[in-house]
Amino acid sequence: MLKGIPAILSPELLKVLCEMGHSDRLVISDGNFPAESMGKDAIVIRMDGHSATDVLDAILQVFPLDTYVEKPVNLMEVMPGDNVETPIWDEYKEIISKYDDRGADAVGNIERFAFYEEAKKVYAIVATGEKALYANVMLQKGVI
């Protein structure tokens, strides 16, 4: 046991977060995201019993966001024609605001298929059991 570390962060995930360097990226995926196929060249960590919001909040307690890019956090855009609400995005922005002074200004959007292409290049994918649609979020690591 460690003091000050959110209990949701497993030893495996802490090791991966520590290994990551400046500009490395991480995806926190929802339950529908093809984590295993997208993460063939990445480390995939399963957190199926947890929500993406809980995982994001815990990770941001120890993970600095990149200050050298305008949008170190990116969400997967809703596809044209998909009539889907994304209230989880507001929750993400509230969480990000707790840990980064830029708040919602640190958050951008990436078209769905471009997000998939970028996800193939990330260091790690944390696959959650999140049921909200379009709840995938990509984080770019900064420096301390």
Image (cartoon, grey):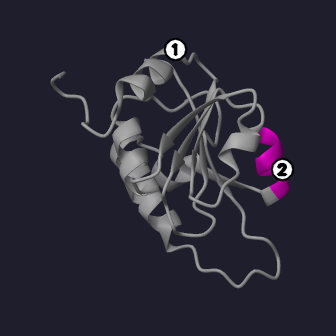
Q: From the viewer's perspective, is 127 left or right of 50? A: right
Dot 1 alpha-carbon crowd within 10 angstroms: few under 14, some 14 to 19, many 20 or more: few
Quarter-of-image position of residue 18: top left
Quarter-of-image position of residue 126: top right
- Residue at x-position 82% and y-position 76%: 80
Q: Quadrant of the N terminus?
A: top left
- Residue at x-position 63% and y-position 31%: 25
Decide whether residue 115 is among the magenta residues: yes
Secondary structure found at label 1: helix
Dot 2 alpha-carbon crowd within 10 angstroms: few under 14, some 14 to 19, many 20 or more: few
Quarter-of-image position of residue 59: top left
Front residue (pair 36, 86): 36
Front residue (pair 141, 116): 116
Front residue (pair 52, 38): 38
| Res 97 seen here | no
Amino acid beneath label 2: Ala
- Residue at x-position 68% and y-position 28%: 42
Residue 22, percent from left and from top: 59, 18
Secondary structure found at label 2: helix
| Res 139 seen here | yes
Which mark is first along the chain, 1 or 2? 1
Q: Which residue is mark 1?
A: 19
Q: Which residues are magenta?
A: 113-118
Q: Quadrant of the C terminus?
A: top left
Amino acid beneath label 1: Glu
Q: Mark 2–mark 1 contact, CB under 8 Å?
A: no
Examine the rendered structure and indicate whether residue 86 appears above or below residue 55.
Answer: below
Q: Which residue is mark 2?
A: 114
Residue 123, percent from left and from top: 65, 26
